[in-house]
Amino acid sequence: MAKIELTLNGKKVSREVEDRTLLVNFIRDSLGLTGTHVGCDTSQCGCCTIHLDGNAVKSCSMLAAQADGSTIVTIEGLAIGDKLHPVQQAFTECHGLQCGFCTPGMIMTSVAIIKDNPNPTDEDVIKGLEGNLCRCTGYVNIVKSVKRAAEIVRTGA
Amino acid sequence: MYELTYQRAKSLADAGSLLAANAEAKLLAGGQTLIPTLKARLAQPSHVIDLAKVAELKGIAEKGGVLTIGAMTRHVEVATSAVVKKAIPALAHLAGLIGDLQVRNLGTIGGSVANNDPAADYPAAVLALNATIKTNKREIKADDYFQGMFSTALGEGEIITHLIFAAPKRAAYEKFAHPASGYAMTGVFIADTASGVRVAVTGAGASGVFRWKDAEAALAKDFSAKAIAGLQVDAGECIGDLHAPAEYRAHLASVMAKRALEQLA
């Protein structure tokens, strides 16, 4: 068994899990945060994207034990109280989702995209989201949402 | 995933002793191939030894035109490093084409070179740039290192510590990426180095990355796209699968080489 201590959405947490536990299962089953989704089991869909020490990673492609001692932010950690994160707000405004299954991963990756590039082009967004699949094929509005989110962050509205 | 024991190495020496202690142990670098492999139960190591906290394996340094990259350096770090961009811009460009954003945030150069996937990008750079693979035991030249699909000169208990690249006069990498996975259907790295022109092809060869010696000879005389017009890699040596037949990959090698040379013209 591995003892995992990490900072999750600003709070210190500690649990014991089997060594082979994937980080995504640790987040969902041990910590009870089910906003991080599992869409494929083959590391391709990006629904499980979280931020590990500030970087977007697929939480299905690492062991929980690898994250011991790190700082993690999941989709549940973005909004401040009732105030949505600008990326969440933009996805709502621009209808950047249909069924919503891929949305947590899309949003976590999008936050990383606009952190590095405050004014992304369509192409920058499309390249940035290569690791996130939407099977409703709602990509047009997703790209629109990311650009709108960047605008909210840049201009404050 | 089958049961396993996770171990976090504290130093290179510690990683070496953990590896020696269990015959079925496996090193874990960025895990972007290993973890999906374990999830699919395609491997059953008794232990995985995480190298993430081994300080000796990190960092990028340049001295007198020689670039040294620690094995645990993430793809994103190579892609965005001002040092790499200045010394070997084609290498930074290549790192930025690997997988996707999330994969680049975890995957490492050492892991990629140790795994030697026939469709991986780094093997093309390592071979074309005539890099040195430094391990905890010795230094291996790229020409001696790649020994076929997923096969390398690494011995038991051997751990890659650094990749050492001499900056070429000029170099370029072009790949035709598989649209879903991002892996190279075919990628060509061309480097004009102090020891001559070297052309490495990844993604196409049935025995993994290989040097395209006919193209090297032609480019040594005339370093231009025109010089290789009409040359083709042997389709008999190429991979044919559900994504593309061997002839298609052989053709892609010519097209990618031409595009790389046009960039350098």
Image: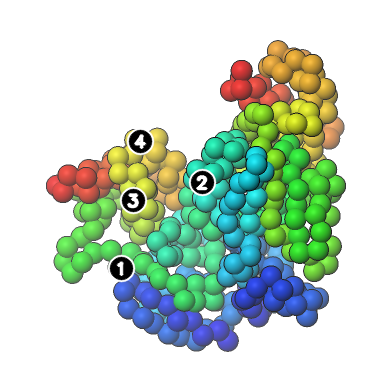
The answer to whether residue B45 is visible is no
Label 2 chain ID? B
Judging depth in this view, the residue of B43 and B217 nearest the camera is B217
From the image, state whether disc 2 or disc 4 is nearer to you: 2
Contact flag, marks 1 and 4 (Cβ < 8 Å): no
Query: What is the secondary structure assignment of the residue under circle 1?
Result: helix
Q: Is residue B164 above or below residue A42?
A: above
The N terminus of chain B lies in which quarter of the figure?
A: bottom right
Amino acid type at mark 1: Glu
From the image, state whether disc 3 or disc 4 is nearer to you: 3
Query: Is A34 placed left or right of B233 in the picture?
Result: left
The C terminus of chain B lies in which quarter of the figure?
A: top right
- Identify the mark at residue B81; answer none if there is no mark: 2
Contact flag, marks 1 and 2 (Cβ < 8 Å): no
The Cα–Cα distance between marks 3 and 1, rounded to whole angstroms, is 18 Å
Q: Are labels 2 and 3 assigned to the same chain?
A: no
Amino acid type at mark 3: Lys
Query: Is A130 placed left or right of B202 in the picture?
Result: left
